[in-house]
Each structure stands twice: as C-alpha cells, then as structure tokens.
Image (spheres, rainbow, N blue to C red):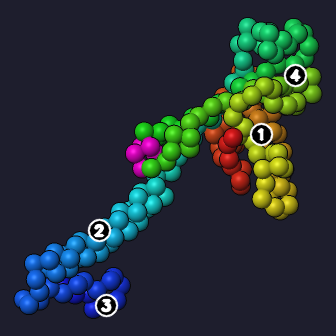
C-alpha cells in the first residue's frame, strides 16, 4: 500500500521491518479498514448515481369503467343519472430496471383512483373510494402556501385536460403527459 499525500483520503499506516508480527497485523487491519471505508463510500456514491440516472417511466390512462362496475354495490351509480365513472390508472413501465437501480417497491408500485364524471356539464365531480391519488390537489400534503397554490393551479389544469380528453373520446385514453405536467407530481 502506498501512503496518500493529496489528503483526499486517510493516510495509510506504514509497516516497518522492526515491527512485531502482532504490530504488522494491527497495521494491516488498519489498512484494510481504511480500504473498506473508501470502498463503502465509493459504493454508496455509485448507488446514488445509478438511482438518480434511472428515472421511473410512468404511463397513465383515464378509462371509462365498464357498466357493471359502475352499478356494483360500492359505487351504485344509477342509470340515467348523468354521472359516469372513469379510472385513472398509473404504472411504472420500467419497474424491474428501477428496482435493480435501488428504487423501492413502494416507489415503483402503480395503482388507480376512480373519478366520477358529470356528463351533463362535462366536469369531473370527485374521486370515489380508495386508491392512488395522482392529482395533487389536497393542501394537507403541501410544504408551503406557494406549493399549495401551484398544486391547485396544476390540478385545475389536469382536471380540465381530462375533461377535454373525455369530450374528445368518451371511452378515455392515455393521459400520461397530462398527469406528469404537474409541477409537484406525486402519488399516495
């Protein structure tokens, strides 16, 4: 081992001919501990770089629920009510790559949320039931009043864009760009 003189890493212990076997082993252990610390630091930096370089690739769809699902017991939308339901679904299409890069299972899990849509005025009414929320409009999750204001603006854009999508295609469709256009995209 050579002694480091540029002061970027700890100086390696020096073994001299006059040292006992025990002293040599202690010095060697110190050298190995230093090498291990350097290797761990480099490994952590490489992991962080790999994680940062591997972005989650989301795909979102906003699709009309089949008639039977709109009429089942948990939703029970009445026929001819002027209200229909759409499912906003999100999935990470490069999940395996993300997991290998260090993204956790939670960060790569897709999901969905059902939204009720008023066919009379062409507006999304509300989210219905449990699920994953991809439209960031709830103030309790925001870090500041400025972020809250931006999220309200973004959610209005998202809802208006999804309403326009439904007007153009009543069965729904891909809405990835709409959802990812939010400045503070998140999912819960």
Left or right of 109 in this view: 1: left
Image side of residue 21 versus residue 42, left or right: left
- The residue under label 3 is 6
Query: Considering only order in the chain, which callout, 4 or 2, is on the residue closer to the N terminus?
Result: 2
Compute the Cα span from label 4 to label 3.
71 Å
Give the number of the mark in front: 1 or 3: 3
Q: Nearer the viewer, residue 48 or 20?
A: 20
The residue carrying mark 4 is 119
Screen quadrant of the C terminus = top right
Q: On the image, which quarter does residue 36 sit in?
A: bottom left
Of mark 1 and mark 4, the one earlier in the sequence is 4
| Mark closer to the chain start, 1 or 3 | 3
Q: Quadrant of residue 34?
A: bottom left
Question: How packed is label 2: few (under 14 Cα within 10 Å), some, or many (20 or more)?
Answer: few
Q: Residue at x 75, y 28 (%)?
A: 130
Residue 5 visible? The answer is yes
The image's mark for residue 171 is: none
Q: What residue lies at 81% left-to-right and 16% top-to-bottom?
A: 75
Q: Earlier in the sequence, mark 2 or mark 1?
A: 2
Task: Say if the magenta span includes residue 73.
Answer: no
Marks 1 and 4: CB-CB under 8 Å?
no
Magenta segment, prevailing SS (helix, strand or loop): helix
Q: CA distance from mark 2 to mark 1?
A: 53 Å
Q: Which residue is mark 1?
A: 161
Of the numbered discs in the image, which one, if any, rests on residue 36?
2
What stretch of residues is rendered in magenta?
Answer: 97-101
Q: Pointer 3: residues within 10 angstroms few (<14), some, or many (20+)?
A: few
Q: CA distance from mark 1 to mark 3?
A: 57 Å
Residue 32: image location, x then y, percent: 23, 71
Q: Secondary structure at mark 3?
A: loop
């Amino acid at each position: 081992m050579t002694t480091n003189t540029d002061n970027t890493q700890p100086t390696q212990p020096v073994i001299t001919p006059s040292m006992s076997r025990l002293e040599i082993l202690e010095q060697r252990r110190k050298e190995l501990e230093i090498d291990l610390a350097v290797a761990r630091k480099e490994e952590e930096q490489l992991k962080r770089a790999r994680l940062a370089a591997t972005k989650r690739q989301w795909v979102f769809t906003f699709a009309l629920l089949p008639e039977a699902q709109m009429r089942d017991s948990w939703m029970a939308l009445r026929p001819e009510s002027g209200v229909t339901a759409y499912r906003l679904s999100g999935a990470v299409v490069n999940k395996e790559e993300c997991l290998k890069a260090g993204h956790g299972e939670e960060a790569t899990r897709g999901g969905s949320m059902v939204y009720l849509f008023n066919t009379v005025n062409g507006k999304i009414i509300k989210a219905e039931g449990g699920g994953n929320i991809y439209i960031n409009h709830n103030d309790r999750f925001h870090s500041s009043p400025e972020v809250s204001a931006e999220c309200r603006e973004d959610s209005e854009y998202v809802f208006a864009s999804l309403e326009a999508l439904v007007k153009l295609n009543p069965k729904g469709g891909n809405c990835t760009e709409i959802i990812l256009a939010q400045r503070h995209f998140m999912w819960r």
